[in-house]
Image (cartoon, rainbow, N blue to C red):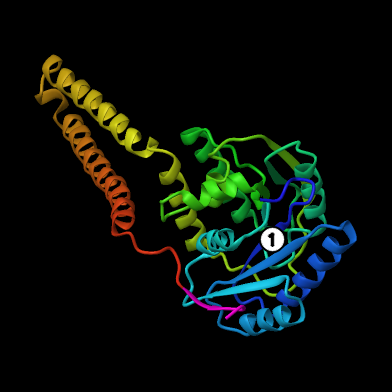
Amino acid sequence: METRTDGMLSVVAPAMNEQDNVPRLCAAIRSVMENAGIPYELIVVDDGSRDATWAAVLEESRKDPRVRGVSFSRNFGKESAIFAGLAEARGACAAVIDSDLQFPPETLAEMYAVWRADEADIVEGRKRARQKESLTYKLFSKTFYRLLRAMSGVDLDNMCDFKLMDRRIVDDLNAMPERQTFFRALSDWPGYRKKEVLFTVAERSSGRSKFTPVKLVRLALGAISSFSAAPLQLVTGAGCVSFLLAAALAIFTLCFPFAEHANELFCWTAVILLALAAILMIALGVVGFYLARIYEEVKGRPRWIVARRTDR
């Protein structure tokens, strides 16, 4: 393995329908790496694109052997694309960057300098400022990060997938058997020394975001269930509250004449029964969600299928 004085940097770039951005990304990273004198390889993972993304990867690979590419047989999602790229990485360290150039390639040189100086094993990019986002997206993001921090203790506020990791962390991640992953938090789980580098998120070079509200909700639910069993404990807490309400209703029935408070008692009984029914249905949903994730893990299907490579 290379030492930190001469280590190669493997840059992993997931791409889905980024035919216009792939050439720009390759050119930008080539310029940054050559100016900084950093030996590198760029691994572009085509996540089942429906445009000419793979053709762009092939062309860039033909012009520059430092550019390598793998193409999935279908869309497996960004998480799978990231881990597939890390599995292909050969460098002494590896970094993950988006293909839309919202994460500035210039920051990679700063991250590499921190790693090379042996100041940290994980160099994380923290957003200094964000691009324009809708109020709904900002509210969703804040709510998700606060819930994740409260339930699991993992603080990812203003963090992202843009980070550089030492070879040891890459090997640890590649050795993890779980198939439902959340890279942003999972890369933080092994520990090791960390240091943050601030950067400003740029506007997309071309195209539009691939994340829909439904995908964001699925990602949030998957992340919380991967790092916390708190939702299951919340169900237990709701059961305790229901028991206290039932006890209060029983005391009310025993202490006051039924005839004088018949209507009031009936209304409270109906409310409590409906609340209990709602709690039971939510509890079944939470338990069912965790069971579904266990079922997906037990099946043991591969996280991705590589259909094509630039070196074949």
Tell me residue 74's x, y (percent): 47, 76
Q: Residue furthest front?
A: 1
The single residue placed furthest to the top in the displayed view is: 255
Instruction: Tell me the residue at 84%/62% (across/down).
Output: 32
Is residue 241 placed above or below 25 in the rendered structure? Answer: above
234 w.r.t. 220: above or below: above
Taking 299 as reference, is 121 above or below it? above
Q: Report the residue at 63% width, 80% height from top.
A: 53
| x then y, percent, for residue 286 | 31, 46
Q: Does residue 176 appear left or right of residue 285 in this picture? A: right
Q: Residue at x 24, y 46 (%)?
A: 284
Q: Amino acid at mark 1?
A: Val
136 is within the stretch colored magenta? no
Q: Please count the marks in the image.
A: 1
- Nearest to the observer: residue 25 or residue 152: 25
- Highlighted magenta segment, given as a residue range: 306-312
- x and y, in percent, of residue 28 in the image: 81, 68
User: Which residue position holds label 1?
Assistant: 11
Tell me the quadrant of the picture where the C terminus can be found.
bottom right
Question: How far across and how far down the image is residue 66, in percent?
Answer: 73, 70
